[in-house]
Image (tube, rainbow, N blue to C red):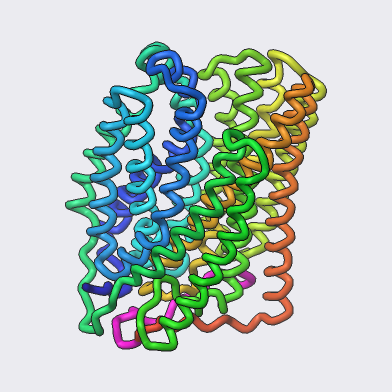
Amino acid sequence: MTTEQARPAPDDRRWKALGVCLTAGFISLLDTSIVNVALPSMEHGLGASEAAQSWVVSGYALTFGLALVPAGRLGDMRGRRQAFLFGLALFTLASAACGLAPGASWLVLFRLLQGTAAGLVAPQTSGLIQQMFQGSERAKAFGLLGSVIGVSTAVGPLAGGLLINAVGTDHGWRWVFFVNLPIGLATFAAGLRLLPRFPASAGRREEFDLFGVLLLGSGVLAVMLPLVQEQQWHGRAKWALLPVAALLLGAFWAWERRQGRRGRAPLVDLALFSLRSFTLGALVSLTYFAGFTTVFFVFTLYLQNTVGYSALAAGVTVLPFAAASAVGAALGGRLVVRYGRKLVVIGLGGVALGLLGVVAAVQVVPGDGVGWATALPMLVGGIGSGLAVSPNTTLTLTRVPVKRAGAAGGVLQTGQRVGSAAGIAVVGAVYFAHLADGRSTTAIQLGLLTAVGFILVAMVLAVADMRERQAHPQPERAVEPVRRGSGDGGAEEKVGRSG
């Protein structure tokens, strides 16, 4: 097993290598939302039941979330380049299998495999960015990653609508998966040529914490299952899994502490949570994604099922958010070095303001004109999202040793997946409860207000971190990895005066 040193790649290759990472991240995150508008096509062309459709969406999120932390740790140990390329190849093959699926059960199975592959790729991206870049360049790179996160999630409904409109209802859903093939193959070929090979250090060998993987995986599964299946599993018995999850995650925490005391490399270095920037940043990310991703879930349902928009028209309606998010994220990557956590607070405020504008627009202009009425609020919310996501990622990971970058990125993105699942469960429950009463306008307004509530919680956390930094401006010390002498690559740089 090898570890990698934190040495930047040559200038003429690392920005191209970043393009490879971002492209892979784009298609893996695109698949979290592109299938939403393809569900009616799956029902029509494949005969997929409501339960199968649910698992096509939730199964991907489930295995994606389960794979993140162990995949990040595997990349830290074996090499992020190798883990990235393997995950990308598996994702491309799974996408082809999904598109060729002869039945709904096969589609669900291949979709679970596709989610696992996406979870293998995602933490390598943040880890490679930390290896290849430092200081303001790292902030710019994370800004571009934030653009990808925002755009890929928001543009999914539009891309799916375009494909179904072009191919037709019977087979349009297959091309939602086939579109990944040329992109995946080209990205894999470019990755072989451009991704840097960081030299291995001469440090001690590390063991993979398999029992830790089982405990963490079981705990995350127990948390996510009742959330992603909230609409399909009727009754309250499903919530009994949450206390089970608490016990499993508590056992995982105790096991990881024991691993550290015995001098063995844990799956997650618990010393990471002694960093204020990492802990609060991860909580901001979790609560923000609980509000951010649910907007597209309930709003596109409202547009198609209540207003009568086509899949394509629903996708076009959320396009202003996607475009503005890309601009905001690129801008945030440049400004985070100067403004730090203040920028995250401003961005979250912009998202909340934009969603409140959507709530008002639905009330004032119901019916077919709602798409035009929500364009400006969506634009404001998108800019805010870009200013929040990428700076928060930069500030959360900046003090993490490069040697633990993969596992830390896995923890951060696991929080995002759990937050998304929890948000969809809560916001979806509010929306469907009022929709059942025949109050569609009230349903979408209350659903969006619930999403705003999550975003305001994230804003409170960001303000708390900002104020504590202002009161105690001394820089934090980087967390030392559990195993010393294994090539940490030097101290991390401080990014931002107040962040």
- Is 127 displayed left or right of 316 in the figure? left
Q: Which residues are magenta?
A: 484-499
Q: Position of residue 491 (x, y in %)?
A: 42, 81
Rendered position, 124 above or below 366: below
Most frequent secondary structure within the magenta stretch:
loop
Residue visible at 50% across and 39% down?
Answer: 153
Residue visible at 51% across and 77% down?
Answer: 254
Q: Position of residue 123 (x, y in %)?
A: 39, 58
In the rendered image, the quadrant that contains the N terminus is: bottom left
Q: Is residue 330 visible?
A: no
In this view, the residue in front, 143 or 100, is 100
Rendered position, 337 above or below 239: below
Q: Is residue 62 visible?
A: yes
Q: Quadrant of residue 336?
A: bottom right
- Is 282 displayed left or right of 473 in the figure? left
In the rendered image, the quadrant that contains the C terminus is: bottom right
Q: Position of residue 239 (x, y in %)?
A: 63, 49
Residue visible at 47% across and 21% down?
Answer: 161
Rendered position, 215 above or below 43: below
Q: Position of residue 436 (x, y in %)?
A: 74, 24
Q: How many marks are shown on the rendered structure?
A: 0
Rendered position, 350 above or below 52: below
Residue 453 is a magenta residue: no
Residue 493 is a magenta residue: yes
Residue visible at 74% across and 52% down?
Answer: 456
In this view, the residue in front, 233 or 380, is 233
- Is 295 displayed left or right of 181 in the figure? right
